[in-house]
Image (cartoon, rainbow, N blue to C red):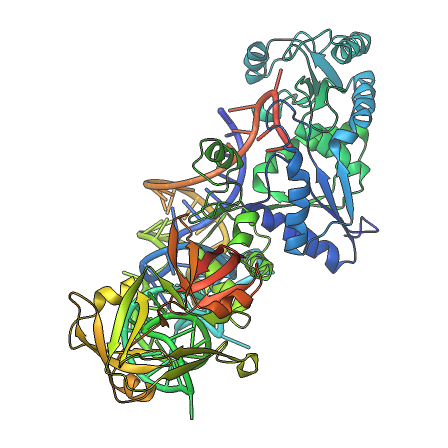
RNA sequence: GCUCCGGUGGUGUAGCCUGGACAAACAUAACGGCCUUUCGAGCCGUUGAUCCCGGGUUCAAAUCCCGGCCGGAGCACCA
């Protein structure tokens, strides 16, 4: 910390997909750390691979939205695809210095040599030749795979993956931002290392999978006489259920398995957001896990518990009758009105009124299939907020009659409390479940007064986020 | 080839660096109770762990050291 006059952290994603829960760890840690020291949080798009892992144009904006949603809006934003000239300048400088060389060996051949710790024939050629070759790379003399700039390291380094690592290569696929303007692109370790210095990054917080990269990049810093930032390697996260891998997600979308990047089965922030997981919950989760190097497996139960804490006080309560089945009440001599609070702890929010008007002593209700199937003749249950009933028959129709007693009585008798709606009142609704299945049902009309995006609790069903109102669709969050 | 990490109640983690108030914490699950109204939320409570095994150091070890077994992760013209 004393080495730097300002704390500057950075998050550097490849815009080849949106952010997922695993990214949230470094993001929140970086952002939190910068904030703590009144520093700067940088977003740097590492879009230097038009061939493999090509950037997806929409993802630049998507990532920014993910960050804003997480409450980690960057103070500065950079695009590596705008900085090619800078990387070229350093490449040329390193070549001149003899700290780097252009290797034209076939990859397999080079591999054989470095595995034995031996230099390839290119390595010790004079800088002039390498500068020539470099111009050749830029000018199109070499095709993809025919030449690569390597940074000199220690050929005897115990880890072969560190030996003379590649820094720039030819990649000719058009880039979504700069088209075919460039044909030589830096590899991760090169552009990342240079930018961290150029952007005066003081603390690098990144996944542990980059530990070897830190070793590689230090060689470059030594060549250039730079001082390497502080590094904190955090362990990878995995989600108990929910796919995080960008390539798998992409394949699944292309194959039609997933509806999109926000498919509820995925661990992307988009998906979590759509399911009603709140950014506060994610933040709490990440701060709870902390900046350790250990891998952590996140369980859905824990996310749900954290989220429930955030969402419970906000969520108004409604009835959602899943797979509705008719229930006929006979022998009801007066009309009734159920008054249920929108939120039991917040009476000021008001009540939901549900009227039941018997015709000739009969009233038709709708109850959830799950409840209907369990009822047996003679069984007593309480219709929440309305009355207690006893089942007369289940065949051919589910029929019950009122019995005396209030909810206290019902509780005393250990009756099940079930939710219900008068026939004809419910609005057609659909709830998308975490496995992407859809449950059809009815919601009470008052629920349409909520806004799209708000979180509600369907009593005895679970918390859900209203996705759209016109056709009423909600995404299930958790119990 | 090389590197890294982990093994703590049914589950997911914290604690280990800086040994002692750890007769082990948090969450979740299960179970029970409460609630002028959610048998599935909320609130309160209960159950539940010989801290992977063996040895060593120490007055004292989940924590340090050695050995073993088991499991996971990462890198090599992707980022």
Q: On the picture, is A349 further left or further right than A74? A: left
Q: Which of B14 and A67 is in front in this view?
A: A67
Residue A67 in percent (x, y) is at: 66, 50
Q: On the picture, is A185 further left or further right than A456? A: right
Q: Is residue A117 positioned above or below A333 on the image?
A: above
Residue B15 in percent (x, y) is at: 52, 61
Residue B16 in percent (x, y) is at: 52, 58
Q: On the picture, is A410 further left or further right than B20? A: left
Q: Which residue is drawn at 80% across and 35% down?
A: A226
Quarter of the picture holding the C terminus of chain A: bottom left
Q: Nearer the viewer, residue A16 or B28?
A: A16
Q: Can residue A232 be seen in this view?
A: yes
The picture quadrant where one finds residue A114 is top right
The picture quadrant where one finds residue A426 is bottom left
Q: Is residue A158 visible?
A: no
Q: Is residue A191 positioned above or below A307 on the image?
A: above
Q: On the picture, is A406 further left or further right than A263? A: left
Residue B3 in percent (x, y) is at: 54, 35
Q: Which residue is drawn at 51% across and 40% down?
A: A260
Q: Which of A310 and A369 is in front in this view?
A: A369
Q: Which of A29 and A67 is in front in this view?
A: A67
Number of disc labels? 0
């Amino acid at each position: 910390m004393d080495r730097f006059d300002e704390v500057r952290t950075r998050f550097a994603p490849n815009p080849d997909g949106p952010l997922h829960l695993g990214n949230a760890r470094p993001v929140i840690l970086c952002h939190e750390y910068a904030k703590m020291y009144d520093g700067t949080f940088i977003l740097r798009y590492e879009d230097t691979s038009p061939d493999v892992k090509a950037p997806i144009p929409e993802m630049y904006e998507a990532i920014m939205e993910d960050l804003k949603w997480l409450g980690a809006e960057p103070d500065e934003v950079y695009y590596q695809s705008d900085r090619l000239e800078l990387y070229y300048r350093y490449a040329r400088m390193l070549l001149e210095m003899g700290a780097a060389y252009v290797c034209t060996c076939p990859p397999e051949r080079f591999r054989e040599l470095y595995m034995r710790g031996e230099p390839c024939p290119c390595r010790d050629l004079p800088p002039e030749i390498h500068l020539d070759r470099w111009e050749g790379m830029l000018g199109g003399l070499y095709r993809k795979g025919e030449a690569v700039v390597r940074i000199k390291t220690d050929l005897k380094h115990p880890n072969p993956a560190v030996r003379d690592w590649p820094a720039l290569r030819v990649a000719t696929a058009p880039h979504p931002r700069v088209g075919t303007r460039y044909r030589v692109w830096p590899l991760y370790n090169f552009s990342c290392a240079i930018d961290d210095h150029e952007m005066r990054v003081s603390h690098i917080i990144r996944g542990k999978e980059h530990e070897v990269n830190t070793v590689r990049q230090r060689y470059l810093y030594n060549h250039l006489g730079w001082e390497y930032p502080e590094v904190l390697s955090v362990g990878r996260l995995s989600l108990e259920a929910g796919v995080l891998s960008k390539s798998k997600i992409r394949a699944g979308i292309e194959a039609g398995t997933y509806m999109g990047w926000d498919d509820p089965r995925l661990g992307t922030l988009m998906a979590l957001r759509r399911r009603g997981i709140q950014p506060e919950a994610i933040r709490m989760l990440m701060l709870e896990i902390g900046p350790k190097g250990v891998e952590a497996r996140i369980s859905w139960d824990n996310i749900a518990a954290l989220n429930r804490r955030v969402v419970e006080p906000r969520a108004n309560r409604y009835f959602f009758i899943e797979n509705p089945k008719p229930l006929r009440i006979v022998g009801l001599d007066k009309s009734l009105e159920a008054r249920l609070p929108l939120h039991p702890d917040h009476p000021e929010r008001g009540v939901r009124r549900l009227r039941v008007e018997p015709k000739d002593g009969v009233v038709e209700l709708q109850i959830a299939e799950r409840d209907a199937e369990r009822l047996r003749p003679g069984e007593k249950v309480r219709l929440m907020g309305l009355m207690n009933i006893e089942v007369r028959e289940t065949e051919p129709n589910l029929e019950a009659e009122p019995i005396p007693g209030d909810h206290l009585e019902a509780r005393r008798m250990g009756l099940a409390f079930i939710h219900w709606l008068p026939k004809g009142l419910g609005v057609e609704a659909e709830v998308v479940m975490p496995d992407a299945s859809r449950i059809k049902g009815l919601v009470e009309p008052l629920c349409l007064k909520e806004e799209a995006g708000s979180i509600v609790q369907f009593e005895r069903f679970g918390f859900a986020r209203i996705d759209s109102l016109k056709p009423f669709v909600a995404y299930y969050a958790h119990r």
